Image: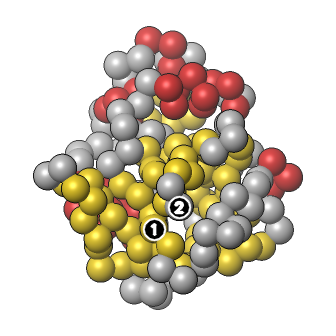
Amino acid sequence: MMYRFFSLLLLTFALAGCVLESAKPLFPDERGVLALDGLGTRFAAEVFDKGAWQRQDDSITFTPEGRHYMGASKEESSRPTAFLLVAMGPSRYLLQVTEEGKPSGYVVAEIKDGAVLLQPVFCDEIKLLPDAASWITFSNTDCKVTGEPGLKDFERLAEKLAPAKMRLVAVE
C-alpha cells in the first residue's frame, strides 16, 4: 500500500498487517496543522527493537505546502506524498498520508521529546475493537473507511492502539 518510506519501516518492524485507508482523504487541507515547524525539515526513521531505538538508513524531507507537508524520501524516485497533521490534542495528531491516485492511509502521531512517534492504525489491531465496525469495512487483512468518521472517532481509536514502535527524529 503506502509509500515506500513507510512500507520499509513496517517491513523493518516485521509487522504483518495493513493500515486503515480511505478511498479519498477524509480531512481537508484547512484542518491541517504545521506541527513539525521548529523540529526540522529532514527526519531519520527509527524503529523500537530489542528495547532500544534503532536508526534506519532512509530519511524523509518535509516541505510545508499550504497547511500540510509534502514528503519525499531521498531513496525514492516517485512523486512526493502529502502529509496532513490534524490536531487531536496539544501534541497528538492524526496523520493522513495521501499519494496522488492512491488511497489515503492513517497514522496516529505524537510529538514528544523532539521526535515524532508514529502509531500506524493497523487493521489487525482495530479488527478486535467492536465499536470500529460502524465506519470500517474489513476484508481479510485489509480495512477501509466506509462510513463518515469524525476526528472524535479517530481519537477513540487512538486510545486503544499499541504504543508507538517507530518514530521520526530530525536530522536537519
Q: Is residue 99 left or right of residue 14?
A: right
Q: Is residue 57 left or right of residue 36?
A: left
Query: 153 above or below 21?
Result: above
Counting labels gives: 2
Residue at 29% over, 79% down? 57
Query: Which residue reaches farthest left?
Result: 50
Residue at 63% over, 24% down? 153
Q: Position of residue 23 (x, y in %)?
A: 60, 47
Q: Which of labels 1 and 2 is toward the front?
A: 2
Q: CA distance from mark 1 to mark 2?
A: 7 Å
Residue at 35% over, 33% down? 162
Query: 95 above or below 72?
Result: above
- In this view of the protein, which residue sits in the foreground, 47 or 172? 172
Q: Position of residue 129 (x, y in %)?
A: 41, 17
Q: Is residue 26 left or right of residue 71?
A: right
Q: Position of residue 168 (x, y in %)?
A: 45, 64
Query: 129 above or below 85?
Result: above
Tags 1 and 2 in contact by the CB under 8 Å rule? Answer: yes
Residue at 41% over, 74% down? 44
Q: Which mark is residue 169?
A: 1
Quadrant location, the C terminus: bottom right
Earlier-in-chain disc, 1 versus 2:
2
SS for callout 2: loop
Q: Is residue 169 visible?
A: yes
Q: To which residue does mark 2 refer?
A: 114
For mark 2, does the 10 Å Cα neighbourhood hold few (<14), some (14 to 19), or many (20 or more) residues?
A: few
Q: Is residue 125 left or right of residue 86?
A: left
Mark 2: amino acid: Gly
Quadrant location, the N terminus: bottom left
